[in-house]
Image (cartoon, helix red, strand yellow):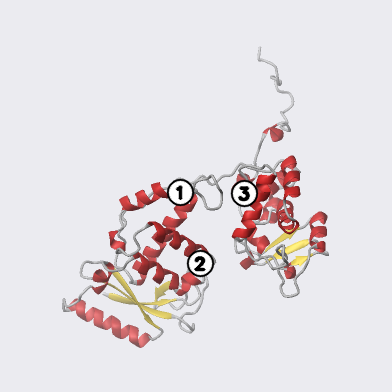
């Protein structure tokens, strides 16, 4: 009626105790019979056939004893579904607190983002009401009103559908984890709102815009933007870049798997102009960070202050509808127009597939003017068929 599971200390995956090796999504392959830090979990079904789970701890004996008690209660029909009662009492505030304190959640690279998303959700939902009071209608109303909110980052714009989608995904993730761990008994949402997100950007810098932007940027921020424009590196890769990764002699930046979005090692080529900029960049005596602020402090992330200076520079340069990530689009488009083979551009920017590269390589009229027509065609440009 019940089963004993082991939670992998490396990836959080739960497998049956009889299976000695973890086969989690990241394929860690840890031998769970000898692994330190593993947690035993008991799984069973209540009298209604609903799945239940409970974390016991590192003791196998305690877990087996708890499982025996549950199986005995089910067999004698004396089982009380306390989790079902608990589900009526868990508030949204308690759910978020529990979710953000989960060890495997705290270890995620996106943990800071999750904290921001739960904070946004808490401002607009009744956090002191039970999670069971949530419904599809409430979340649809949340979606509609949230899409009308002003963007705190881009004045004059609305919150993007992607932001609302991430907030609802965070809520869904928290509830699903709570149900899987036994903190809650069921998910009250039968149907989640659908949000259409248009992810494809079609904005690159023209040569004249690039010239104006360089003049508008302060020197410390100009270095970051200059390197982004000429390498196609992601914002986080740049802000976390350390001198130990930079080979100015050979002209490369060597990124380890933990430094990239794709979690794969990557080598980034630096043109001589970028090498020259980095050679002249000031360095901190107390930090390995490549980029420093106006006061010489190491910059490790794209802060609200950095973003404000960036937005002011765009306004001064009279550049509309442009984001920092569009520098990556600009690099890919320029690199492809220069005749570089697709596989080299993919290696430089860290794209895994050509379909992703095509999303970043934007085609406009200047590209079409280079289109060559096959010789011997019976109909030439400007001619009509007889």
Q: Secondary structure at mark 2?
A: helix
Residue lying at the far left of the rendered structure = 77
**In front: 82, or 98?**
98
Quadrant housing the N terminus = bottom left
Could you tell whether 244 is left or right of 171 in the image?
Answer: right
| x 61%, y 51%: residue | 353
Cα distance between the residues tagged 1 and 3: 20 Å
Contact flag, marks 1 and 2 (Cβ < 8 Å): no
Q: Give the residue at mark 1.
A: 149
Q: Give percent across and percent down for residue 250.
A: 82, 63
Q: Secondary structure at mark 3?
A: loop
| x 70%, y 63%: residue | 293
Q: Secondary structure at mark 1?
A: loop
Q: Give the residue at mark 3.
A: 323
Q: Quadrant of residue 245?
A: bottom right
Q: Which of the two marks, 3 or 2, is nearer to us in this view? A: 3
Q: Give the residue at mark 2.
A: 111
Q: Quadrant of residue 307?
A: bottom right
Q: Is residue 328 visible?
A: no
| x 61%, y 43%: residue | 321
């Amino acid at each position: 009626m019940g089963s004993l599971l082991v939670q992998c200390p490396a990836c959080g995956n739960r497998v049956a105790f009889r299976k000695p090796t973890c086969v989690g999504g990241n394929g860690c392959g840890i031998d769970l019979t000898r692994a330190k830090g593993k947690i035993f979990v008991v799984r069973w079904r209540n009298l209604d056939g609903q799945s239940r789970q409970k974390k016991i701890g590192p003791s196998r004996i305690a877990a087996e004893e708890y499982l025996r008690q549950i199986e005995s209660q089910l067999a004698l029909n004396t089982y009380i579904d306390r989790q079902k009662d608990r589900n009526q009492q868990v508030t949204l505030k308690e759910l978020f607190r529990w979710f953000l304190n989960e060890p495997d959640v705290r270890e995620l690279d996106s943990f800071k983002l999750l904290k921001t998303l739960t904070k946004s959700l808490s401002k607009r939902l009744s956090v002191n009401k039970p999670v069971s009071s949530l419904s599809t209608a409430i979340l649809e109303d949340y979606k509609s009103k949230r899409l009308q909110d002003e963007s705190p980052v881009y004045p004059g714009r609305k919150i993007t559908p992607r932001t609302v989608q991430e907030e609802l995904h965070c809520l869904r993730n928290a509830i699903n984890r709570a149900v899987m761990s036994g903190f809650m008994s069921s998910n009250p949402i039968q149907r989640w709102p659908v949000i259409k997100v248009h992810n494809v950007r079609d904005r690159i810098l023209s040569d004249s815009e690039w010239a104006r932007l360089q003049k508008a940027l302060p020197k410390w921020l100009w270095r970051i933007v200059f390197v982004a424009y000429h390498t196609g590196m992601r914002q986080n890769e740049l802000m976390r870049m350390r001198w130990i990764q930079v080979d100015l002699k050979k002209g490369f930046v060597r990124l380890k798997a933990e430094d990239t979005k794709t979690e794969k090692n990557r080598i980034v080529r630096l043109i001589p102009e970028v090498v020259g900029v980095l050679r002249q960049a000031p360095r901190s005596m107390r930090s390995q960070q490549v980029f420093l602020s106006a006061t010489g402090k190491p910059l490790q992330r794209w802060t609200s202050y950095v973003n404000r200076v960036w937005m002011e520079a765009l306004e001064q340069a009279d550049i509309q509808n442009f984001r920092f990530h569009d520098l990556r689009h600009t690099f890919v488009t320029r690199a492809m127009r220069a005749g570089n083979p697709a596989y080299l551009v993919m290696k430089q920017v860290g794209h895994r597939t050509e379909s992703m590269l095509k999303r970043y390589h934007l085609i406009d009229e200047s590209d079409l003017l280079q289109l060559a027509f096959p010789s011997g065609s019976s109909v030439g440009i400007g001619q009509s068929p007889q």
